[in-house]
Each structure stands twice: as C-alpha cells, then as structure tokens.
Amino acid sequence: MTAIEHDAPVAHAAAAAEQGRLAQAWSAFAESRVAVGALGVAALLILVAALAPWITPQNPYDLTQLSIMDNMLAPGSRGFDGRLYLLGTDDQGRDMLSAIVYGLRLSLVVGIVATAIALAIGAAVGIVAAYFGGRLDSLLMRLVDIQLSFPAILIALILLAILGKGVDKVVIALVSVQWAYYARTIRSSALVERRREYIEAAQGLALPRWRIIFRHLLPNAFPPLIVVATVQVAHAIALEATLSFLGIGVPITEPSLGLLIANGYGYMLSGRYWIAFYPGIALLVAIVAINLVGDQLRDVMNPRLKR
C-alpha cells in the first residue's frame, strides 16, 4: 500500500474529529443568547454594508448627487427637493445615513481583508516554527516578540507616515501589527497537536513534510485562530477609524466612519451633534457586536475562561 493510500484514512479520521468538534462548539455557542444576538447584528451589518449601493438614498461620495442647499439639515428634515433625511446631512450636504452605510462597508472590508492576510502570514510562520522547532523556531519567535513589544498604534503610525494615505496602505499597516498574534497562537496550539498519535503515524508513513503540516497539523491547530481572528477584526476596525480620525488613514475622498466622526467633531459644541454622533454609534455597535461574538467563542474554545 502506498503512502497516499495510508494517508487517506488518517485524513478521514482527522476530518471526522474536526466536524464533531465544530458541532459541539456551535451547540455551546448557542447557549448564550447575547452572543447569538450579537452574531445576528454582525451578520446584518455585513449584509447592509454589502448592499450599500442599492439600499442607500444616495452615493455620498458622488459629487453629482450632492446639494449644497441641503447641508447641515437636522435628522428628520426634508431637503430642497423634498427628500427626507432620516439622520440629517453634514456640512457638504451628504445624507448621513448613506455616508454611515458606505463608511461601515469600508471599515468591514478593511478589517476583514487585513485580518485574513495577517492570519495567513501568521499561521504560516507559527506552524512552521512549531513543526521544525530548534533554531528556526527561536528565530521566528524572537521576531514575533520584537513585533509584539511595540504598541500597535505606534507601528501603524510609523508605517503610514512612510507609505502615505490610502486604503491599501492602511491594510498593509494593519497586517503588520496583527500577524504576530496569529503566529504565537497557532504555534502554541500546534506544539500540542504535534505530539499526538495521528502526526506520529503520518511521520511513520514517511509522508512529505508539507502534507503533514498542511493536511494534518494545520487543520487541527487552527480552531484557536478563529477566536483571535474575530477579536482582531474588531481591533482592525477600531484602529482604522482611529487612524482616519487622526487624518493619516484613508483619504477624504473615501468613505470612513473615522473621517465622518472627525468631520463632525468640530460641530459638536454648536449643536450639530448628529454629524459625529451617529457614525460613532455605528462604529460602537459594530465593534461591540464582533467582540461579543469573539468573547463567546473564547469561552467555547476554553471553558475554563468562562465567567
């Protein structure tokens, strides 16, 4: 019997065990109504953001759709053409509801894309370090320690000062501050999995190292990364909003909740609260919902942390 034929039952057993763990994890997750509700809110926000061009009254970043006659309208007011602005308008006549939905879409895209790229890089680094060990493990982990020793906001500020403004630049900055979290997490998980029988069996069958790493070790060491990724999406959204609020994130021609808050901050004392207040509420709801989901996932993955 060839090594590939031997590999099939090993992979089947690992896949069956993984499916059983996922079913059990979902059952434990559903025990928290707050977490299920937060998951529903997060899913709704993603759906609304994805359908932004079709469900919003206007494209707030298309100058041909804006009217300066409708600037600074209070929530519930009607514009020059009779259009109802539920959340009012800003100083440029942009419908705040539309601007918030477009800004939410950008925040979610940046957070999810940056998290996905950072997860891929960190998982590769951590799994390689755990499997090969020795000097390679020490070298990679020292790089992780160095990266984690600096505040994330400081690294992002330095990178954006060098790279300049732009959505792609913000993604690069977020990836640079996130990948080390995944590397350390999956290394810890993979070190435990590496000593299990199915890995020893695969090694005894003389399977290629890449097959053992990516078909056996990585899938079984991956679940803890789900918790980290969920929390890091919220962290990336908050960090992007902070950078944009400071004026070094996305350019003013792009929708961003951080830019909307910064734009309305100067009008707070004049009574035009809605320009900054509603984008802030949207940002808060998104971050809290994602964090609540991450907290419940953490409790499911490690019941000892359950409060």
Image: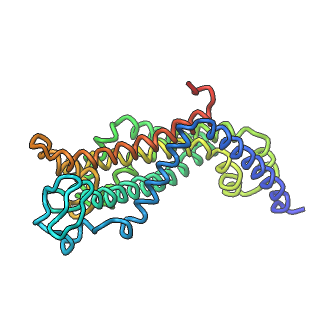
Q: How many marks?
A: 0
- Give the vertical position of 217 relative to 28 (above or below): below
Report x, y in % for residue 21.
71, 43
Q: Residue at x 65, y 44 (%)?
A: 26
Judged left or right of residue 228, residue 171 is left
| Colour treatment of the image | rainbow
Which quadrant of the figure has residue 113? Answer: bottom left
Give how far across and how far down residue 188 sits, in percent: 59, 37
Q: Is residue 132 visible?
A: no
Relative depth, front residue between 295 and 115: 295
Which quadrant, please, contains the N terminus?
A: bottom right
Q: Residue at x 45, y 43 (%)?
A: 289
Which quadrant would residue 62 be assigned to in this image? bottom left
Is 171 situated left or right of 290 in this image? left
Q: Residue 26 vs residue 247: left or right?
A: right
Q: Quadrant of the C terminus?
A: top right
Residue 283: % across, % down: 34, 46
| Above/below status of 198 relative to 100 | above
The outermost residue toward the bottom is 64
